[in-house]
Amino acid sequence: MDYQFKEIERKWQQFWAGHQTFKADNNSSKPKYYVLDMFPYPSGAGLHVGHPLGYIASDIFARYKRLKGFNVLHPMGYDSFGLPAEQYAIQTGQHPAITTEANINTYRRQLDQIGFSFDWSREVRTSSPDFYKWTQWIFMQLFNSWYNKAADKAESIEKLVKHFETSGSAGIDAVCDEDILSFTAAKWNAMGNHQQQQELLKYRLTYLRESTVNWCPALGTVLANDEVKDGFSERGGYPVEQKKMMQWSMRITAYAERLLQGLDTIDWPEPLKEMQRNWIGKSIGASVKFPIERQESRAKSQDYIEVFTTRVDTIFGVTFMVIAPEHELVPSLTTPEQKAEIDAYIAQTKKKSELDRMADAKTVSGAFTGSYVINPVNNEKVPIYIADYVLAGYGTGAVMAVPSGDQRDYLFAKHFDLPIVPIIDIQKIETEADPTKEGRYINSDFMNGLNYKEGTAKVIEFLEQKGVGKAKVNYRMRDAIFGRQRYWGEPVPVYFKDNLPHLIDEKDLPLLLPEIDKYLPTETGEPPLGRALGWNYHGFDYELSTMPGWAGSSWYWYRYMDAHNDNEFASKKAIEYWKDVDLYIGGSEHATGHLLYSRFWNKFLVDMGLAFEEEPFKKLINQGHIQGRSNFVYRLIDNDGRGTNTFVSHGLIKQYKTSELHVDVNIVENDILDIEKFRNWREEYKDADFIQENGKYHCGVEVEKMSKSKYNVVNPDDIIARHGADTLRMYEMFLGPLEQSKPWNTNGIEGVFKFLRKFWKLFHDDQFNFRVSDEAPSKAELKSLHKIIRKVEEDIERFSFNTSVSSFMIAVNELTDLKCNKRAILHDLVIVLSPYAPHISEELWELLGNKAGSLSNAPYPKFNPEYLVEDEFAYPISINGKMKLNLNISLALEPADIEKFVLESPDVQKYLDGKTPKKVIVVKGRIVNIVI
RNA sequence: GCUCGGGUGGUGGAACUGGUAGACACGCAGGACUUAAAAUCCUGUGAUCCUAAAAGAUCGUGCGGGUUCGAUUCCCGCCCCGAGUACCA
């Protein structure tokens, strides 16, 4: 039989499913290995050819690790809460659970066809109550915890309460809100429960607080910073505005330092780590309080403005101060004379959209408040301005402006004609600011003559002594907003009593999503859950927002370890066994979302003693994105400027007036249009004419996003129907390096398919009868085999799957040339190929007389370097680094003899021409160059 | 602007620590088989020069320099493409 991929693939997929071949065991004497993919959101469009790229790579690795004797956990599931199902529900009234279920079934069918070795018995779905029960449970643990800076870990809130009861707020160093009270034990105990609870909320790791949020009116929900792009929602592209709301937040900032430090311990791509570092945005500097010079008549709300600066050493160069227009002190600082101007400026900033503000980044604007602060180092009077280049959300929302050292301050000073004072002797400030740290200070009183390091230490010491400043570390990262005004998400297990949030009883978990009539906000503007009639907790109102998309994905890898546990999110035993993810494959778009939140929750679970590895994903690989590759046809335009039904081949379009049209890539092969298929594609093209080149119609090409409207979506089902899953798997790897983004291009797929046929034919005679020989393999055959054994091992270990595929082709070509059908060779060859092309490998494995299904755990063949030793090899030598010649040298020669042989050989002597060489370059025992 | 990737034949891409650049595949050209086509197989395929042919020579990894016996690889400067980020004090 010729290579019948359809039957073979169906047969083995059924076998694997029926025999649970890839079921992972939680008890094994083998070492464990956990290979994880970022689980997909099951969208209605199904998988396109780009989605499985990472899954194929991880599957190859998982299968390889099994061959290497590991107990491999390789699961798959669905991140099944999300907006599209809900949008669809709003439009059609269909319950998102139904849509989701249907989409999951499509995904599952498509995934099964590709022949993945997933352990489906451990499948998880974030929208399933037995999964989100534990998402809610973890939320409750976060609510019941606070972050103890002294111990540098999260601790139970009860411990904090005990401390308050016995010692008051003294001695507590916590990550918390800024407006915490300080109190004695007696005062605490005298507080009512209501006030105590309110105070505790400022410490909890998940808490309710009024905060400015990204509100998207069109979507009717709050978005996280990473879901907003340039002032528009990432999904849908609707405008986003700032709004103050009571919101659930996660105190991720408590973990900022650990999240930063942990990056140094994990094997992740450097760019990704860099993104997280930038996101966390640590800057080391100082905070300084500048006393406000109050006029007697004005109210004394606060008598200083605090700034954060990374260059406290430049404090003698401060000539003005700038605060954000939203700064809370603005009203009290504005003098009556300046009020009109300030109000106008604030009104103007409010009007500006995020986009305008960015476009305006270079134009200087601002307004004077009329008030002054005193520079604490020299008691000089410094005017206070407001300007939108200062962000309310970073630092303290106020900056000390040093125009000689900071370019923005410089431009501002020039615009408002404020003094620019140089403070370092080598500063050049004629045309722009000079932020140098070299040189010695001038105009800086007690710092004069010091260098950067000395000066910084000195000024901090001075400020600390005066009690107006201290060294401080600042982070850019904000606490994560945790509420969405949406239906299709995890309900927050909280009810309200006396306006205070309370957790529901643990035994009432999961808090199920209630049924509602419509998936829209209520008429009063409450989230969709507000429509659930009679939905309350013993008469008390539930929280109506649901959790964001990242909640379930922040811990799901633990659920795979023990997917059916009803009593715990995963048993301690299972977590102790599987520990962490050894290899995680997914896209870099999750850098500052999922991958950061997951690390945060993981650290929290470790603090609680519920997990044991500080970092959840030891090694991470970002697979590149598969872009679409669009094809175009060119419609001839007639003299009246109307489109005709004649199409011009791409090479000839310069000679005609044409318009470009997308054409379905599935009716184009190697950029040549299938004219018949084109005529059938659409009614209007039935009678199309073509101006061709050499009898062919060439299409134009462009790389774009894969999308339906561009007719460049390639469905894996079609590829599998034509060439089979093994071809698809190998071709996706062959396309290029895994981590590189590249356009999908079916042009070369024939080559991979031909390879698999050749491989099949190694085991068969010309009539396609299975025929292998038990003769002893020849040296040449062993050499081919062992080259590939080593190559594939090396390639897989360094995730270079594309080069492996090439090497397979070479090996099979060599063995075909040798007419090799030796059982011993083919036996090992099948094992080595099996991670890449598992179906054909299983079939041949069985034909070779092995027990069906035993391939997945067959031992990977051991590489023997002896077989690579040749008797003679072509020895390349360059002369003067240029001329090259090849000598045939016997490998039996010793290195010293080789040298003699080379130098005395007639070819070399010809070049030497009687002279002795000046220098002989030897690399690894080989002469590579002779300098004459 | 800043940070991180990356520029190699007609195309996708190899070359792992500086050591025969262009593996492998696609495409293209020629040939075999065939009444014909498809499929399959074989040969050639960086450019230029030279040759009847064999052989040979020169150039060649974005551009310009440098280090080295030797550079796609290392260093300096520049250009272009992609990704992330954006007034972060």
Image (cartoon, rainbow, N blue to C red):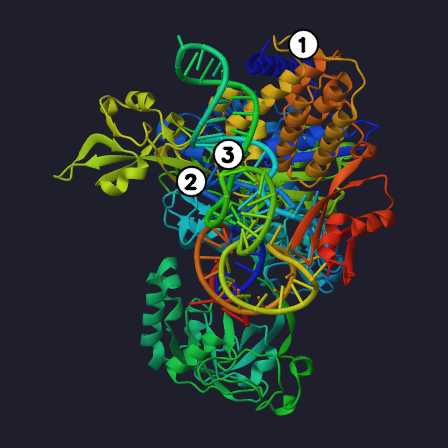
Q: How far from the left and from the top, in percent, is residue A676?
A: 31, 20
Q: Secondary structure at mark 2?
A: loop
Marks 1 and 2: which is nearer the front? 1
Q: Nearer the viewer, residue A48 or A613?
A: A48
User: Can you say which quadrant of the picture contains the N terminus of chain A?
Assistant: top right
Please name which of the two marks, 1 or 3, marks the residue nearer to the observer: 1
x and y, in percent, of residue A629 in the image: 42, 37
Residue at point 86% right, 39% down?
Answer: A892
Chain letter of disc 3 in the image: A
Query: Spatial distance from mark 1 to mark 2, Cα to Cα?
Result: 45 Å
Q: Can residue A804 be seen at all in this image of the molecule?
A: yes
Choose top left, top right, bottom left or bottom right for residue A650. top left
Discs 1, 2: same chain:
yes
Image mark 1: chain:
A
Report which residue position mark 1 lands on: A770
Q: Earlier in the sequence, mark 1 or mark 2?
A: 2
Rendered residue at 47%/76% (across/down): A407
For numbered disc 3, what is the local secondary structure?
loop
Circles 1, 2 touching at the beta carbon (< 8 Å): no
Q: Position of residue B67 (x, y in %)?
A: 67, 68
The answer to whether one can see residue A127 in this image is no
Relative image position of residue A272 (x, y in whole percent)? 60, 51
Query: What residue is pinned by disc 2?
Result: A705
Residue A752 lies, with reference to residue A627, above or below; the image says above
- Quarter-of-image position of residue B4: bottom right
What residue is disc 3 on?
A50
Tag 2: residue type?
Lys
A160 left or right of B8?
right
